[in-house]
Amino acid sequence: MSKLSQIPKAAALVDYDGRTVAATLDEIEPKVAEFVGAVDVFIPGYPDLSVSTGAIFNDDRAAKFSTVDGREWRFINGRLSAMLTDTAANDVDVFVPGFTSTISEVTGTNDDRTSYIIDAAGRRWWYDAARGWTYGAATAAGIRHFDAVIYGSNPAGLMAAARLKLRGKSVCVLEPYTIFGGMHACGLGMVDRPTNLQGGADSIKCIGGLTRSLYFQSVANIVGTEDPDLKWQAAAHVYEQVAQNILIEYADLAIADVQIDGPRSLRIDTNAMTGEKTIRGVFTREGYISGDVFLDCSYEMDLGAAALGKAGYRVGRESQEETGEAWAGVAPRIVFPQMSSSYAYYTGDGAPLDFSSIPTDLPVLIDDPQATAGQADGNVQAFNFRLNLTRDPDLYVPFEKPAGYDYRYCLPFLERIAQRMNLAAGAGAYLKPTICRDSDSFGWRYPMFSARGADGPITNRWQFNELDLLNFQIGHAEGNRAKRSTMLDEHAFISKSLFWFIAFDPKAREYGLAALQDDLNDVTQPDGFAHVGPLGLCADEFQSSKFGNGFPPHTYVRECRRLIAQYIMSYFDQAPVADGGTPTKATSIGLYGYSWDMHSLLRQWVRNGSINANDRIAVEGPWPGQEAKTALYQMPAEMMWPALALKSRNLIVPVCAGNTHLAWAPDRLEPNYGIRGEAAGENAAWYLDNLVSGAAVHDQPYPNLAGRLTERGSILSLS
């Protein structure tokens, strides 16, 4: 199938409930006016797009654009598509029947459903069978005001929005990434769940409320499965659709690709007498958006950092002396014992690793910092891309060789592969020299449900979770938009280089990866889904990603800032009572638990004098034994409220909540974000109900918060 034939045609528009609301092609008559010059129009995912020529409908709706690089772009079914010299008459731009107001933006979904329309006054409209086109929150004097402004559309942001809307509040969701849905929509398909904890086998029951009945049930509805164990193994596009559906129903306005870049992005009023700070609004390229309460549900806590300043958050590891945690601070590094002259842990003989030949313009290796175990530093866990990979020939997209590729960038990463392949069969970290075949394959994690089939969920892809990009996360937390964009490009370059190296570079065979390369390109053996073909990216994922079809647009940000909260969770709040822990809390907003699952942070070059042959690679991150299971612990409401000394009145931070670096390890999981997002939503709704009283978000009486949460099924205790 050619790429041109995959471009959707707007033969009809279908609303969320499946009703046809558009005319046929023959009845659509787009009247287009040509113009030349800069166009003041928002292009989703392309904030710096330079327009040279363009066309609009006679009612000012955007039709098509040509950029300065000569490419033509069109909005088809509400989505921006790069046209591949396709000028066929049936490529009709989106038409909205029965809507007479001037349209400034039309947003749809990738399965041709109409999501919503933004008119020239900034109001959000959706189609209702009984009332026709209906708009949500009204605007005044060109300023869009909402009861609540939520930053982030991961499970925390979505569940907060749902809770607020169910309380009758108007909601605006601003998403910092280019797609809605957070990490789930960026490829994190398998959800780590609180199972087999020291709290008991029934700990999975701690996930309740709308997180279970709305968010994850929506996933099950799309793929056609009922899973009492809540495994939720769904493809990225499924989670994106879930996010879009929830936003359609529970948000009055949702805008993606909105970055808050420091204090200048916010308007904050400070009480001259008390010093209390109240956030009033956010400046975006969409205009000024004001609100009465603000929820930072992002992975980076950019809104909170802009509002609170450096006193309001922590980045990196505390010391053992500061927290008393045995696994706090810098961990003992793992030094791989093999010399570079033989590199014996490669399968086969292996080629010598010449450390001095490895390029130094990217941080594939950093010099040994010679840090003392247990001391504090500013480092966080490494990031990576969560890829959806397939052997289905109908979906296959080959791995791309990036511009500037040099196989030497890949060499320091081979310890992760080769080390595990050379363990004895059956050992805990043992891997076969195969890729995405079964539970012993390199990169195998979980099969992903992609759609509903006649006999149950369709499963035609795997979630790949290997090759953490150690060192590349350094500086992300404090980086501005431009810095993070550069770092994201570097992450993508190294990831693409690694996959090209493993898949196609003959040099990989010299370094003992011949069997892995052969398996990746094998066209004779079926995978677990009976597909036969080489392994590659999925053509139906991330179709608008800047990194190409099938490649996620964003990395998995495992850790960034952490709130200086009224209560900061530590190891002792998560450990069983028998181990000195206090896992119960008087102000519980939910339960969770996992293991202290800390990913590595740094890949170091350990030099041995001037003799290159005796140099080593070391990896530093988790402490030995740190994979132990937590108790099923309660989370206090105070962990999502800024410390009292920060004098914040209307800011709630449910994702980057108060945790030590160690406590963040089991706390950083998406279902947990949903649980806390529900609490944040109910907390915000109470604050809005009591605006005239002058109360702050942290003044909500706990019995009131607990009652609101349990009213819709949240589980605050298993006792």
Image (cartoon, rainbow, N blue to C red):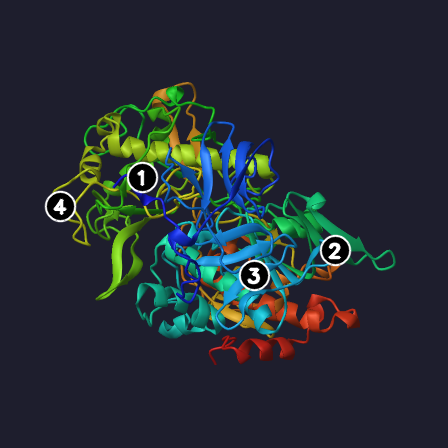
Question: Which residue bears the numbered disc 2?
Answer: 141
- Which percent across, then down, holds residue 369? 51, 33
Q: Secondary structure at mark 4?
A: loop
Q: Which mark is residue 125?
A: 3
Residue 177 tag number: none
Residue at 65 percent of width and 52 percent of height: 304
Whether residue 198 is visible: yes
N-terminal label among 2 and 1? 1
Query: Label 2, label 4: how many angstroms apart (C-alpha)?
Result: 64 Å
Q: Amino acid at mark 2?
A: Ala
- Residue 81: x and y in percent read 43, 42
168 or 582: nearer the viewer: 168
Q: Which residue is mark 4?
A: 525
Name the residue beneath numbered marker 1: 3
Determine the image quadrant of residue 233. bottom left
The crowding category of the residue bearing disc 2, from other C-alpha atoms within 10 Å (few below 14, some 14 to 19, many at least 20), is few
Amino acid at the residue labelled 4: Gln
Q: CA distance from mark 3 to mark 1?
A: 32 Å
Q: CA distance from mark 4 to mark 1?
A: 28 Å
Q: How far is disc 3 from disc 4 in space, using C-alphas?
A: 51 Å
Callout 3: SS: strand
